[in-house]
Amino acid sequence: MSTRCYKCGQEIPDTHTNCPNCGTPKIEESNVLLWGLLSAFLPFIGIVLYYMWKDLKPRTTVRITQGLWSSIPIYFVVLGLIILGSFNQTFFLGFIILVALVLIFTHQSLCVSIAKKKGQNEFLAGLIGLIPVYGMIHYLRAEPVRPLSPTALPAILNPKNILGTMVIYLELTALAAIVVVPIIYAIGTSLSPNAGILNTIWPKEPSLVNYKFLFEGSRIIGGIEETTDFTKWYANTLVVAILTMIGAVLFVTGTAYVFARYKFKGKKAGLLTILVLQMFPSFLSLIAIFTLFQSFGLTNNPYALVIIYVSGGIPFNVWLIKGYLANVPKELDESAKIDGANKLQIFFKIILPLSVPIVSFVAVTSFMGPWMDYILPSFLIIDSEKWTLAVGIFDFINDASDTNYPAFAAAALIVAVPITTLYVVFQRYLIEGITAGANKG
């Protein structure tokens, strides 16, 4: 493999160290790019090299000049951070961490791109690329496993490409911080042994006393006993959520199957009525619901909430599943009828198995509802031991004279466990269900 002279354009064989035409020393492209990057972060070295090589190595000095121009905004940012840090050290530290992460991830991305072009192992490049400077030097000097285009490396290390990569990682890192930092703070608050708000992101002396308090139901603070019915709230909510999920899947899927498969009088009017009902949330009819529950003796009964949750999810879910079932071939039903299957057998043995993605979506969303709902349980349930989790957990911070933010944070994290588990387990079906419900019908 030969290298082209940067001065006259003559190809220099591997056995030569100088150009046979003009005598210019051979310079590897990887070294040229490396000097340019070095000049961007260490401009003083770049200036010295520029005056040393401006006649001997013209192409190298072009890269060094580009690096020197790039160093101007870099050092302006650093100077601004130093000035800002003198006023707000916390913000300064956070910004430094953000910039460091963006630079590390950008460095890793460039290393992986170079390794890919040279035919190197990309997974290994991702690991080595996390080592600043060394990863770049390693892959710039690595021998290519397959033929390498002369424009491949310059395209990767082009300032526009580097800047674009940095902007992408800046956005991703900022979004990750927005999501992760509150979770870390919630975990830190749950581990705080004190009852007040945590002023730092992590307590000095982490403790599991709040989790112990939630599961044991009582503790003594300053000679005063504090109690909670958290385990009862959890059991109430879990039972309501499971019953709601089962009821919603069976009732809504059956209703949607009827609308999708059969023709009957009032079908269009019924669908339009269901469509209009989507516009009104269930809590708008709180007074009517309370009156009906009181008439039938269903107030102060957490399991009666299942009726509201199942019926409240009918409008949206019926249209969603109907749109999916409308695209399941009707020939399957007809074939099953010829084989002697009745309508229930067709529904449970053919339609339901084919509708797993959309049914999984409805099941998970129905299961999640009772865990998050506060308005209906607080309005219909009076006794504290019959509360659901949303009402009970809010009680930790509802009383201005007796707040317990660490217990509130610990309870919130425990509530997140079943919902997160369901999302992880049914992730594939959820994605299929969402896309199918959006595209079909």
Image: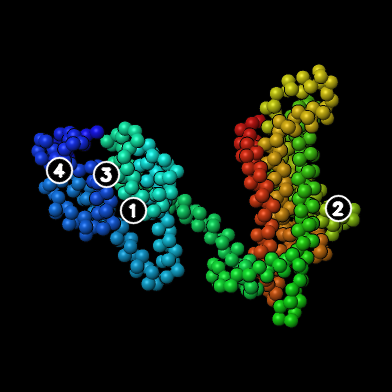
Q: Residue 25: give its label.
A: 4
Give whichever of discs 2 and 3 has the lower sequence position: 3
Residue at the far top in the pictured view: 338
Amino acid type of the residue that numbered disc 4 sits on in the rendered structure: Pro
Q: How much space separates mark 2 and mark 3, taking CA atoms?
A: 79 Å
Q: Position of residue 70 (x, y in %)?
A: 27, 53
The structure residue drawn at horizontal position 79% and vertical position 52%, both measured from the top left corner, is: 239
- Is 161 located above or below residue 101 in the figure? above
Residue contact at pointers 1 and 4, CB within 8 angstroms: no
**In this picture, residue 60 sits left or right of residue 332:** left
- According to the picture, the residue beneath numbered tag 2 turns out to be 292
What secondary structure is marked by label 4? Answer: loop
**In this picture, residue 220 sits left or right of residue 154:** right
Residue contact at pointers 4 and 3, CB within 8 angstroms: no
Give whichever of discs 2 and 4 has the lower sequence position: 4
What secondary structure is marked by label 3? Answer: helix
Q: How much space separates mark 2 and mark 1, taking CA atoms?
A: 71 Å
What secondary structure is marked by label 2? Answer: helix
Residue contact at pointers 2 and 3, CB within 8 angstroms: no
Quadrant of res 381: bottom right
Q: Nearer the viewer, residue 265 or 122?
A: 122
- According to the picture, the residue beneath numbered tag 3 turns out to be 30
Amino acid type of the residue that numbered disc 3 sits on in the rendered structure: Ser
- According to the picture, the residue beneath numbered tag 1 turns out to be 133
Amino acid type of the residue that numbered disc 1 sits on in the rendered structure: Val
Give whichever of discs 4 and 3 has the lower sequence position: 4
Give whichever of discs 2 and 1 has the lower sequence position: 1
- Is 163 located above or below residue 207 in the figure? above
